[in-house]
Amino acid sequence: MTFAGVRESAIELLTEWNAPDAGQDALRHAVLAFLYAREDACERACVPGHITASALVVSHSGAEVLLTLHPRLARWVQLGGHCEPADTDIVAAATREATEESGIAGLTIDAALGAIHVHALTCSLGVPTRHLDLQFIARAPSDAVIAISDESLDLRWWPVDALPDGIDAAVAHLVAVARSR
């Protein structure tokens, strides 16, 4: 299995994306350059950095967002993570990650990119790297029941107008994107 479908879909998505501002457009160009330069750009083993996929899960009513207390980051973030060889494209990777980490079946993901976020961290490689995160918005069904995964310290619905203290600006931005849709 390969990551070719994920890589090609990420290139197509970013090529066609109308970034909402100059900062997001600069990230779009940088991530596209990385994707063109690295055949392994979507693989976790790509030490200089790698594409990840995440999704902010919004409640059916739109009044709440589901955040996970990330064990490595020790803060509340949207659901997401590494691409896998079985993912058919970048949207499928984000959907799989959100489903695995939330326990919610039947998420509906908006295939339009919500935002790009690049962050440095030490992930499962055990060495410093960068996640070039392509972020999407997903809607939970009305009967959604969450189940915490082993990838999280906690999992909780938060009102969109009462996010947890110390929330990262990138997460707050993604919540704003979700509210605008």
Image (cartoon, rainbow, N blue to C red):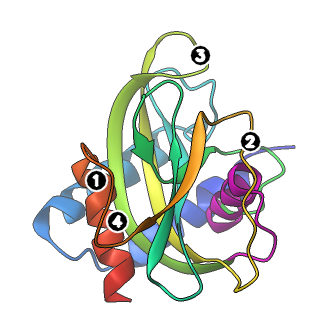
Upstream in the sequence, badge 1 or badge 3?
3
Query: Is 136 above or below relative to 75?
Result: below
Where disc 3 sits, the SS reads: loop
Closer to viewer: mark 4 or mark 3: 4
User: In front here: 145 or 91?
Assistant: 145
Residue under the image location 47 percent in, 85 percent down: 62
**Furthest-left residue in view?**
22
Q: Amino acid at mark 3?
A: Leu
Can residue 59 be found in the magenta stretch? no
Upstream in the sequence, badge 2 or badge 3?
3
In this figure, which residue is indicated by the disc labeled 3?
125
Tell me where the magenta segment starts and ends, as one range: 90-107
> Where is residue 38 drawn, in percent x and y?
51, 37
Q: Which mark is residue 20?
A: none
Give the distance between the C-alpha atoms of the residues marked 4 and 3, in whole angstroms: 26 Å
Upstream in the sequence, badge 4 or badge 2?
2
Residue 66 located left or right of residue 121? right
What secondary structure characterizes most of the magenta part?
Answer: helix
In this figure, which residue is indicated by the disc labeled 2?
149
